[in-house]
Image (cartoon, rainbow, N blue to C red):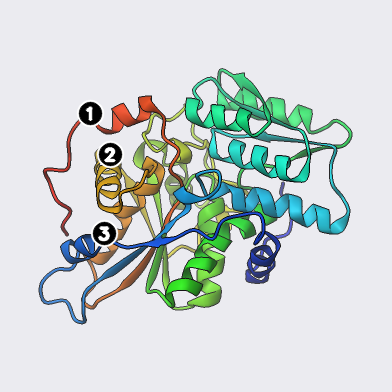
Amino acid sequence: MSHFPSPRFEDVLLAAERIKPLVSRTQILNSSLLDSWLTPEGIEGAGHRIFFKAECMQRTGAFKLRGASNVLAALAEQGEMPTHVVANSSGNHAQAIAYACQEFGLPATIFTTTSVSKVKAAATEYYGADILQFDTREQADEAVKEAATRSGVLWVPPFNHPHIIAGQGTAAFEAIQDIGEVDAAVAPVGGGGLISGTLLAVRGLCPNAKVIGAEPLNANDAAVSLREGKIVKLTETPQTLADGAATPCVGELTFPFIQQLDDFYEVDEVQIAYWTQWLQHLLKIHVEPTSAMSMAAVAGYLAEQESAKRVLVILSGGNIDQAMMQRIWQTDYLTQPPML
C-alpha cells in the first residue's frame, strides 16, 4: 500500500461531501455528571466539557462505514468500479464493506479469524457478504492478498489507504462543525486509520488543539513503534477487551500520522472495562471497549490541565456480543465513580 499518496485535510473535505448520502450524521452526546466528576476544584473557567461523537449509532454500528463508503464512492466518481470487493477484518470493517458493497450492488468476501465477534460476523453476512474464517490474523491477511490478485477484484484494507483515512476523518470533522472548536480530541488506535483521519480533521479546523491516541497495553504495537521510531509488529495474537484495536501493526500510511500525535496512552484491561461500564451507564448507549478505552487518555489529559477544556472523544463503535459483555462485567466497577 506504500504507493498510495498520504491524504490531506482537503481529502477529508471531499470525503465529507462524497459520503453524505451514504452514512449517518451521528449524535454528539454529553454527560454533565461526568463533566463535574472530572473537573477538579479550583479549575479556571466553568469546568471541563467532554463531547462524545457517537459512531456507535452509525448505520453499521461503527465509524468504519465512513472509510469504506469513501473508497467505493471515489471509485464510482472515476468510473473505476471493481467487479468484486475483498477485505480482511476483525469485524467492524467487515460490516462496513458488506454494507457499502450492498449500497453499490457489488459482491463482497471478508477474510477474518475464527475468533471474530459473533454479532459482527452475523451482521456482515446479513448485509450480503461471504465470510471466510482462518485460525490466525496472518493467515487471513495472506489469503486476502492472494484473492486481490484476481482480475476485477479490489482489496479494501481496514486502515492503510488514503480514502479510508480521509473517510474516517469525517467523524471528527462533523463533530467540530456541530460543537465548535475544541482544545483536544481523543480517539482509539488500532491500525491507525481513525486517529490519522482525526488528526487531519482537527489540524485543519482547530490547529492549536491537542490530538491524543489511546491503545490497549496488551496490544501496544503502536506505542512500541513510537518508541522504536519504526513500525513494530506484534509477535503473538493480543488478548484484550478492546478487540477493535488488536491489530498486529499500524500501516505505512498511518504511522507518520501517529508520530505527529501530541500524546499517547497505553491502557490496561481494568481501565478498559471500567470505562466501558461507566460510559454505558452515563450515556445510556452500547459502547465497545475499544471506544471506551479513550476515556483513560481523557482523564490523563484533564488531570494535567489548570483551566477548563473542551474535549472531543470519538466513540468508535458499539457492536458487542454476549461473550464480550460477560467479560466486561465480570467485576462491577460502578461502585467507584470516575474522578481525577
Looking at the rendered image, the disc whose residue lies closer to the viewer, 1 or 3, is 1
From the top left corner, tell me how far across and down residue 113 is, in percent: 56, 23
What label does residue 300 carry, if any?
3
Residue situated in front as seen by the camera: 24 or 138: 24
User: Circles 1 and 2: CB distance less than 8 Å?
Assistant: yes
Give the residue displayed 40% in from the left and 74% down from the top.
182
The amino acid marked with disc number 2 is: Ala
What residue did someone put label 1 on? Answer: 330
Looking at the rendered image, the disc whose residue lies closer to the viewer, 3 or 2, is 2
From the top left corner, tell me how far across and down residue 91 is, in percent: 54, 34
Q: Secondary structure at mark 2?
A: helix
From the top left corner, tell me how far across and down residue 322 is, in percent: 37, 26
From the top left corner, tell me how far across and down residue 263 is, in percent: 38, 61
Q: Secondary structure at mark 3?
A: helix
Query: In 3D space, how far apart are the residues under numbered discs 3 and 2 (Cα atoms)?
Result: 17 Å
Give the residue displayed 63% in from the left and 26% down from the top.
140
On the question of residue 169 being in view, the answer is: yes
- Check the picture and name the quadrant holding the C terminus: bottom left
Q: Secondary structure at mark 1?
A: loop
Residue 170 drawn above or below residue 135: below
Q: Quadrant of residue 108?
A: top right
Residue situated in front as seen by the camera: 260 or 82: 82
Give the residue displayed 60% in from the left and 48% down from the top.
65
N-term-proximal mark, 1 vs 3: 3
